[in-house]
Amino acid sequence: MSKAILILTPFFSPNVGGVETHLDDLCKALIKRGIHVFVLTYQPLASSLKAPAKEVSRNLYVRRLWWFGRKKDMFHKLQNKPLLQFLYLTPYLFLYSFYFLIRFPQIETIHAMGATGTFIGRFLALVFRKKFIADIETVYNQSILSRYHNWVLKWILNGANHIFIPAEVMRPQLIHTYGVPSQKISVFRYWIDQAVFYPRKDNHEKLFSQWNNKFIVLFVGRLLEIKGVDLLMEIALQVPQDVLFVVIGEGTRKEYLRQQMAHYPNMVFMGPVLNSELRKYYWSADLFIMPSLYEEGFGRVNMEALACGLPVLASDKKGIREALQEGTGIFVEPTAHNFARAIVDLKNNPQKIQIMKQNANVFTKRFFSEKNIDCFLKVYQS
């Protein structure tokens, strides 16, 4: 097995997001197994949070590079301009990664994330003759990708020794659009640190006293149109005023959302919250909502909600369905009317909510344990 692994990613903790949490869990699990983990990344670009440039602990070395555009939220502003976003993220990380591998020649495997990470990883694998693992967390949006983008992606993906994806819905695109052999693709299931995310052990009051007589609907995610943030505001207008929407995250719709709060008395915007603090919000909520307008790769926050005993109401998208099962979540076509009707139905049916909470706890223990790392270890060993 590789005894030293480089995780190459533009985004890492304390950045808040599903990918970042996945990488935190991966690092912890690898370190526990005696594997030395190196992480090369940027200072948080999608969040106002700060982190040390270097972080060194037992079997872990993290190097975070400063890069411009953070205060202007460049990453999110370029969300629908993939070429410009790629050019923004790639150059410095690309150049520094060569120096990094020269400095740490003991690295045997490159585990690269996303378009930027995998592009760099492809070059590093060629130059330094390292094993190259691509970790893809999203379905590529063909409506904004040119023929050139797809050619580059095909070159990257076919150059990987192996590709990990979090949802089966992503496999057909890799095979049919990019020509990746099916045997090079593994579907993995995220795992949850159940020492961090677990059902509350008592019926203590909600996080804020003014929430106690409300039916709390919680949203956690990037504040983007495709994540359904605008749809969330439409939903808020169609439900009773004792339904309170609590919104956590950062993104391009942050300022707009903040400005609109005065017009939505049943919405509260909390901004970004550290992953380690999220469970308090899951515990205080009655329902988790995921109104995504696109094919999510998996939707990790759903798993965190379930692990805390919180039922999920989500868009009927294939990737999201893979993260849940009937009895733990409800799926609707993503319209304001459909979501509002489902929320009111659940609010008026506390017995149904209680059954879903019990199912969530059983489902989490069965499917979201750390044994899910075995598929990674098998590829590292090969």
Image (cartoon, grey):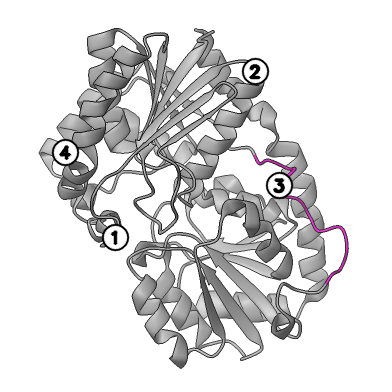
Mark 4 sits on what residue?
Answer: 149
Q: Are marks 2 and 4 in contact (CB under 8 Å)?
A: no
Label 3, secondary structure: give it: loop
Q: Amino acid at mark 1?
A: Asp
The span picked out in magenta is: 192-204
Q: Is residue 196 magenta?
A: yes
Of residues 63 and 375, the one nearer the viewer is 63
Q: Is residue 12 visible?
A: yes
Q: Residue at x 66, y 88 (%)?
A: 242
Q: Disc 1 and disc 4: Cα gap in Å?
A: 23 Å
Q: Judge from the rendering whether residue 48 lies leftward or rightward of residue 312; answer left or right.
A: left
Q: Disc 2 and disc 4: Cα gap in Å?
A: 38 Å
Q: Answer few, some or many: residues within 10 Å of disc 3's Cα (few below 14, many 20 plus, some between 14 and 19).
A: some
Q: Disc 1 and disc 3: Cα gap in Å?
A: 29 Å
Label 2, secondary structure: give it: loop
Mark 1 sits on what residue?
Answer: 73
Q: Judge from the rendering whether residue 62 lies leftward or rightward of residue 213; answer left or right.
A: left
> Which mark is in front, 2 or 4?
2
Please give the label number shown on residue 196.
3
Q: Amino acid at mark 2?
A: Arg
Marked residue nearer the N-terminal end (1 or 4): 1
Q: Are marks 4 and 3 in contact (CB under 8 Å)?
A: no
What percent of the width, then of the height, locates residue 268? Answer: 54, 79
Q: Disc 1 and disc 2: Cα gap in Å?
A: 37 Å
Q: Locate the N terminus and report the quarter of the image it occupies.
A: top right
